[in-house]
Image (cartoon, rainbow, N blue to C red):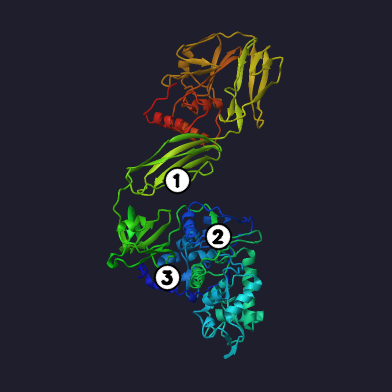
């Protein structure tokens, strides 16, 4: 039994199945990118969204090799260039397609019965993930010659359904007379392709795609005009001539008056025009996005404009290899990867009335009418038979518990299909009538062994997920990171710090999609800077002061530094202790041993003795004044708590002179002066007040968040204000939470 083959647009699907009727080819656009071309590179590192599809094929075909071609091109840029936004004729579909496949739902004719495709339609065929499946993968097969998987029999298999591989497999017509070729077409194509170094199965598929191998009636290859054009090269309509006429004239100009000359000429054309420049897969021949370093432009040359041509040719190739039992051979596939690709695979365009309501039901597939008989289910990449076949699933075991389980993630409305998700992450569509709900003990929640962790760069953390209830049938959990540049996580919950910053690690249950998160604060052990509590100090002659700079980050291994004075006669240095020698000013410089980072402060030495008394409700330590009452922090109130015979002025963190009715905040400096000369200086510290406004608000939250993420810098006094526990070496995500709760009135940050 064949299950799930019929959809609600059968006519369109049958047209696609009849792939040999598609004959649009050899188009060049006038919208190529020809400057600042990115150079592709190849490795085996695919984005996470590719891996479920790659891994499923690897499991089934361990001898197949999958390589990622990193194009360096932006997804949206490519989509624009390959759709009507840049060139109306670059991507076409037949006019019998339904409206959602066409631009504006209308027939904008470009070439015969072919019309401009919709952008959604182009996105569907452009997204490689829609075709990383048993058959579609062959549009990514490398087109170089390989004796291991390419044989004369395989070429014959491609041509078998055509006159070239059937009753006339060793004959040709010349001006209406049949003659002996002296060999078979399959043998000749194999021989010539091997000479050029091209996959002969691809060449045979291309001939079948372009001319149906119809040497009986095909005007371009039946010899009626004494020339042969097996690849339709130059065969397109112009104002003065038809596609057939232009194709024949092209062949005459090339001297293709014999079968070998035409085949070799076409093979060389494909090599020199496409494969030589990096268009070395069927996909790349359609979408000109690969630059191995030799390309002169990108998005400029496409072998065909029919958006389904790669899918069609891949199907021919796959069916040939399959029929000859060659799928166990070692094939190499080059699959493109774009920058800024959507996480979700591009959906095929759907009619307006078709949509899917969200669901999360565990299901299995069954045909209960024929117990004991093998069921065959066609799972597709879209809710229609026009969509690529993701997998053909054979189920022989009866009973719900024995069947393959999926999660139904969408219930189709006005369509015969529902949307399902494999446990490995692949998404597909299956006919509703085969879907049944699976009754079992469902997951109710998931928790982690920790919800926050500090982690040094290079160090690892093991996260463990506990799924509840304990008797839940499916306890499988997947792991993701919010930023793999900061922290990575593998399938077992092992987290590794990559660079400084904050990342969120999420555990998601396969069943019910329950989540739990852990915030990871990654810190570097390399010195990235040094800072001081203050940028100026005031000392009286004879006074000494120990200054301890802050090495950034707090987790740095090498905390060694040196101190120098610009004038040892005014300020001397002994270790981290500076001593005021005589009246004047000097600059002290702190320099890290690792990295050579520096921080400086001005030291003002005065002969005056301090005469400043601070109210006991405040805390004064190392010239930093804290324990400020946030309900009583006007300049006038601060003045009432300080007794001095000096003149006092207040300057905020931005350098603005404050008035009596203004609030003091973090970084506000209290300057004590005599005769206009600064004698002493204190600096205000308010925990939670990062921006120095004197209040704790959303701006403080944003500034700290950007600092933790490495997107902005803060002054040392602001960093101190961020550390709400007053003892840690650096602010953490926990400080963000405390500030947020303070703003919401659910917590009070103590001063």
In contact (CB < 8 Å): disc 3 and disc 1: no
State which quarter of the image contains the C terminus. Answer: top left
For mark 3, what is the residue? 97
| Residue count near mark 2 (Cα–Cα under 10 Å), binned few <14, some 14–19, many ≥20 | some
Residue nearest the viewer, comparing 344 with 420: 420
Question: Which is in the foreground here, disc 3 or disc 1?
Answer: 1
Q: Is residue 496 left or right of residue 745?
A: right
Query: Residue 514 placed where, x, y %?
Result: 37, 45
- Mark 3 or 1, nearer chain start: 3
- Mark 1 or 2, nearer chain start: 2
For mark 2, what is the residue? 65
- Mark 2 or 3, nearer chain start: 2
The residue sitting at 43% across, 43% down in the picture is 506
Q: Is residue 650 above or below residue 333?
A: above
Query: Residue 78 placed where, x, y %?
Result: 54, 58
Does dot 1 land on a helix, a strand or a loop?
strand
Query: Residue 588 placed where, x, y %?
Result: 66, 21
Residue nearest the viewer, comparing 597 with 582: 597
For mark 1, what is the residue? 479
Is residue 108 in sight in this rendering?
no
The residue sitting at 55% across, 64% down in the picture is 331
Does dot 2 land on a helix, a strand or a loop?
strand
| Residue count near mark 3 (Cα–Cα under 10 Å), binned few <14, some 14–19, many ≥20 | many
Q: Is residue 274 above or below residue 474?
A: below
Separation of marks 3 and 1 at Cα, in angstroms? 41 Å
Q: Is residue 687 left or right of residue 602?
A: left
In contact (CB < 8 Å): disc 2 and disc 3: no
Separation of marks 1 and 2 at Cα, in angstroms? 26 Å
In contact (CB < 8 Å): disc 1 and disc 2: no
| Residue count near mark 1 (Cα–Cα under 10 Å), binned few <14, some 14–19, many ≥20 | many
Question: Which is in the foreground here, disc 2 or disc 3?
Answer: 2
Separation of marks 2 and 3 at Cα, in angstroms? 35 Å
């Amino acid at each position: 039994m064949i299950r799930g083959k019929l959809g609600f647009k059968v006519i369109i699907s049958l047209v696609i199945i009849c792939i040999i009727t598609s004959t649009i080819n050899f188009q060049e656009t006038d919208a190529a990118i020809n400057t600042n071309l990115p150079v592709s590179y190849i490795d085996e590192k695919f984005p996470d969204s590719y891996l479920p599809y790659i891994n499923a094929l690897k499991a089934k075909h361990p001898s197949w090799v999958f390589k990622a071609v990193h194009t360096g091109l932006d997804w949206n840029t490519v989509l624009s260039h390959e759709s009507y936004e840049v060139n109306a004729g670059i991507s076409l579909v037949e006019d019998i397609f339904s409206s959602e496949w066409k631009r504006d739902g209308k027939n904008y004719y470009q070439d015969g019965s072919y019309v401009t495709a919709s952008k959604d339609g182009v996105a569907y065929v452009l997204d490689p993930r829609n075709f990383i499946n048993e058959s579609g993968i062959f549009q990514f097969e490398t087109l170089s010659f390989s004796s291991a998987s390419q044989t004369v029999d395989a070429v014959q298999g491609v041509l078998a359904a055509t006159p070239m591989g059937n009753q006339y497999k060793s004959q040709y017509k010349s001006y209406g007379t049949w003659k002996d070729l002296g060999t078979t077409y399959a043998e000749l194509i194999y021989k010539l392709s091997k000479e050029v170094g091209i996959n002969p199965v691809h060449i045979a598929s291309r001939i079948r795609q372009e001319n149906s191998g119809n040497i009986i009636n095909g005007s371009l290859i039946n010899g009626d005009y004494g020339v042969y054009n097996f690849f339709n090269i130059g065969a397109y309509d112009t104002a003065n001539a038809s596609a057939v006429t232009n194709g024949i004239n092209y062949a005459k100009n090339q001297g293709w008056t014999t079968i070998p000359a035409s085949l070799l000429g076409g093979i060389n054309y494909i090599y020199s025009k496409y494969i030589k420049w990096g268009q070395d897969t069927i996909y790349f021949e359609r979408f000109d996005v690969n630059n191995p370093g030799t390309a002169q432009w990108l998005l400029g040359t496409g072998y065909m404009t029919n958006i389904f041509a790669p899918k069609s040719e891949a199907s021919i190739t796959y069916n040939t290899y399959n029929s000859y039992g060659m799928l166990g051979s070692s094939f190499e596939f080059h699959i493109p990867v774009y920058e800024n690709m959507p996480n979700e695979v591009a959906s095929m365009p759907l009619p307006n009335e078709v949509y899917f309501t969200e669901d999360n039901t565990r299901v299995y597939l069954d045909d209960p009418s024929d117990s004991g008989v093998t069921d065959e289910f066609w799972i597709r990449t879209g809710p229609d038979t026009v969509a690529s076949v993701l997998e053909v699933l054979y189920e022989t075991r009866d009973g719900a518990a024995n069947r393959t389980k999926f999660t139904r993630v969408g219930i189709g409305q006005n369509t015969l299909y529902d949307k399902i998700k494999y446990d490995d992450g692949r998404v597909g569509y299956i006919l509703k009538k085969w879907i049944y709900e699976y009754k079992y003990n469902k997951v109710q929640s998931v928790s982690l062994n920790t919800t926050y962790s500090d982690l040094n760069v290079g160090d690892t953390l093991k996260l463990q997920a506990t799924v509840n209830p304990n008797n839940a049938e499916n306890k499988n959990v997947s792991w993701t990171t919010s930023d793999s540049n900061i922290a990575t996580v593998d399938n077992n919950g092992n987290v590794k710090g990559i660079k400084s910053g904050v990342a969120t690690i999420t555990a998601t249950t396969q069943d019910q999609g329950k989540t739990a998160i852990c915030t990871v604060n990654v810190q570097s052990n390399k010195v990235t800077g040094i800072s001081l509590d203050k940028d100026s100090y005031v000392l009286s002659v004879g006074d000494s002061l120990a200054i301890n700079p802050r090495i950034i980050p707090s987790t740095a291994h090498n905390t060694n530094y040196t101190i120098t004075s610009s004038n040892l006669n005014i300020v001397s240095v002994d270790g981290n202790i500076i001593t005021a020698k005589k009246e004047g000013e000097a600059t002290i410089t702190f320099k890290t041993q690792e990295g050579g980072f520096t921080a400086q402060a001005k030291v003002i030495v005065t002969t005056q003795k301090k005469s400043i008394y601070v109210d006991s409700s405040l805390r004064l330590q190392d010239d930093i004044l804290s324990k400020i009452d946030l309900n009583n922090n006007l300049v006038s109130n601060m003045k009432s708590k300080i007794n001095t015979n000096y003149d006092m002025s207040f300057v905020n963190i931005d350098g603005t002179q404050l008035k009596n009715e203004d609030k003091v905040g973090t970084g506000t400096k209290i300057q004590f002066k005599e005769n206009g000369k600064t004698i002493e200086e204190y600096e205000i510290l308010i925990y939670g007040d990062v921006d120095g406004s004197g209040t704790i608000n959303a701006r403080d939250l944003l500034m700290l968040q950007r600092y933790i993420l490495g997107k902005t810098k803060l002054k040392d006094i602001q960093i101190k204000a961020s550390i709400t526990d007053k003892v840690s070496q650096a602010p953490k995500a926990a400080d963000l939470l405390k500030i947020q709760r303070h703003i919401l009135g659910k917590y009070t940050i103590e001063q």
